[in-house]
Amino acid sequence: FGLVPAMSLGSTVFFDVNNNGVQDLASPTETGIAGVAVQLLFDADRNGSISGAELTPVDDTITNAAGNYFFGDLPPGNYQVIIPTAPAFAPRSSSGQNVTDNQDGTDDGAQSGPGAPTSSPAVSLTPGDEPNEGSVYPGADQDNGNELNGNMTVDFGFFEVVSVGDFVWNDLNNNGLQQIGEPGISGVQMSLYQ
């Protein structure tokens, strides 16, 4: 009989207030986000490439009150984690690199635009060769100490998008106040600087 250990994959979806791609544990506002749908895809042809029709959905879950998610009892192989819908109040993926860095507490997501699905890079689960992420970040200990057979470092950070704008008008009496009868001016080019 050829037996392999059950593998596991998971970690945290968090609110990245300052959009630095890291869950800042010292910040009381960079907490986990509860109730986020998470989907796990498997590389069906096992060629190591994560793309297209070869990806097979194998499981889905919802983040818990701490923003953690967990997939267990998995066979070894290549996987991808998807957030199908970004959180409504924080629809933009933070400044992660979308690389498998095996570092807990860093954003691993890639997104095409606010509210769009967010995906991890390929995550290869290999028996006896998974990162020991310690227990500093939320979700790190979900694999119950089976560190070498579980990867608890696939995190997703999201932040709230903001907007700025208003009205350009002809201040007829030059008093600095927008008053009735003072028309808007169209065609004015505006520039935004950070």
Image (tube, rainbow, N blue to C red):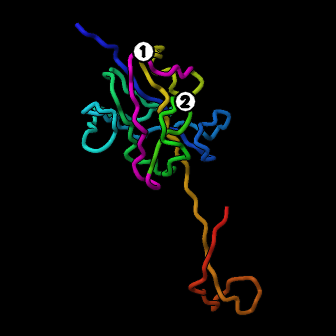
Which stretch is magenta? 112-134
Please identify the quarter of the rendering in which residue 171 is found. bottom right
The residue carrying mark 2 is 103
| Numbered circle sitting on residue 128 | 1
Residue furthest top in the image: 1
Instruction: Look at label 2 and name its amino acid.
Output: Gln
Quarter assignment of residue 5: top left
Give x and y (percent) for residue 91.
Answer: 48, 51
Residue 82 visible, this angle:
yes
Please state which of residues 114 and 120 is positioned toward the viewer in this rendering. Answer: 120
Q: In which quarter of the image is the N terminus?
A: top left
Q: Which residue is drawn at 47% across and 34% down?
A: 100
> Is residue 30 magenta-colored?
no
User: Where is residue 106 drawn, in percent x and y?
Assistant: 55, 36
Q: What element carries label 2?
A: loop
Give me the disc on residue 112: none
Counting the numbered discs, the total is 2
- Where on the picture, by quarter, is residue 77? top left
Residue 65 visible (yes or no): no
Q: In this view, does 163 lie above or below 91?
A: below
Residue 150 location (% of width, % of height): 43, 21
CA distance separating discs 2 and 1: 17 Å
**Kind of residue indicated by mark 1:** Gly
- Residue at image location 45% in from the left, 24% down from the top: 151
Q: In this view, does 192 lie to the left or right of 161?
A: right
At 39% from the left and 28% from the top, the residue drawn is: 124
Q: Give whichever of 96, 39 is nearer the camera.
A: 96
Q: Which of marks 2 and 1 is nearer the N terminus?
A: 2
